Image: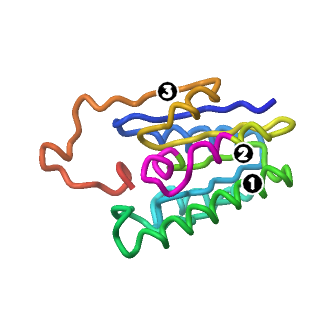
Amino acid sequence: MPRVLLFTGDGKGKTTAAMGMVLRAAGHNMRVCIIQFIKNKETGEDAALSLLPQVELLKMGQGFVPDTRHADFPAHRDKARQALQAAAEKIRQKACDLLVLDEINTACACHLLEAEEVAELIREIRGPLILVLTGRDAPEILVDLADTVTVMECRKHGFAQGIAAEKGVEY
């Protein structure tokens, strides 16, 4: 039976919480895979993760997701489907002990993926696996499947005060 942890909400810290779990798992010499569904730019965590031999990072997103009517939307959807297929393969191969699907909730909310197909993948997991789902606007079906759900709530954010995204804080 897998553990399924879900981090959602409009507040900062969803991916950060998942990366804390990655660090913890790496400290226990567990095999870790992170699949990013939206992000495509280099971040500080990419460099840090490259120092951990048991951690694999698959950056499969196209970046900011346009409206469904935009000409670039199908390319974003195709990349998200490829990322979901990669996740399914990691699960089938039992290739990791901790699998982070970063921004998968957002991929569902932006109509890149159907929440039901993600739910079906989770239901098919056999054997031990720690699965972490991150991103805003988590679909209720995924919330229901998770055994642990944390909602990050934004009470105040520096961006609203004119503070630009900062290296080491936001990326």
**Amino acid tagged 3:** Thr
Q: How many marks?
A: 3
Q: Earlier in the sequence, mark 1 or mark 2?
A: 1
Residue ID for mark 1 = 88
Q: Which range of residues does the magenta coloring cover?
A: 105-119
Q: Residue at x 42, y 68 (%)?
A: 73
Label 1 or label 3, whichever lies nearer to me, is 1
Q: Write down the quadrant of residue 118 in the picture.
A: top right
Between 18 and 80, the one nearer to me in the picture? 80
Q: Is residue 54 shown in magenta?
A: no
Residue placed under numbered mark 2 in the picture: 121
Name the spot of residue 104 as percent of width and height, x first. 54, 49
Q: Residue at x 73, y 59 (%)?
A: 53
Q: Is residue 114 magenta?
A: yes
Q: Earlier in the sequence, mark 3 or mark 2?
A: 2
Q: Secondary structure at mark 3?
A: strand
Label whose residue precedes the other's in the sequence (1 or 3): 1
Quadrant position of the N terminus in the picture? top right
- Image coordinates of residue 23 in percent, x first then y, are 62, 43
The secondary structure that most of the magenta stretch takes on is helix
Disc 1 secondary structure class: helix
Hey, what amino acid is under mark 2?
A: Leu
Q: In this rendering, is residue 36 above or below 129?
A: below
- Whether label 1 touches label 2, CB < 8 Å: yes
For disc 3, the marked residue is 150
Colour scheme of the picture: rainbow
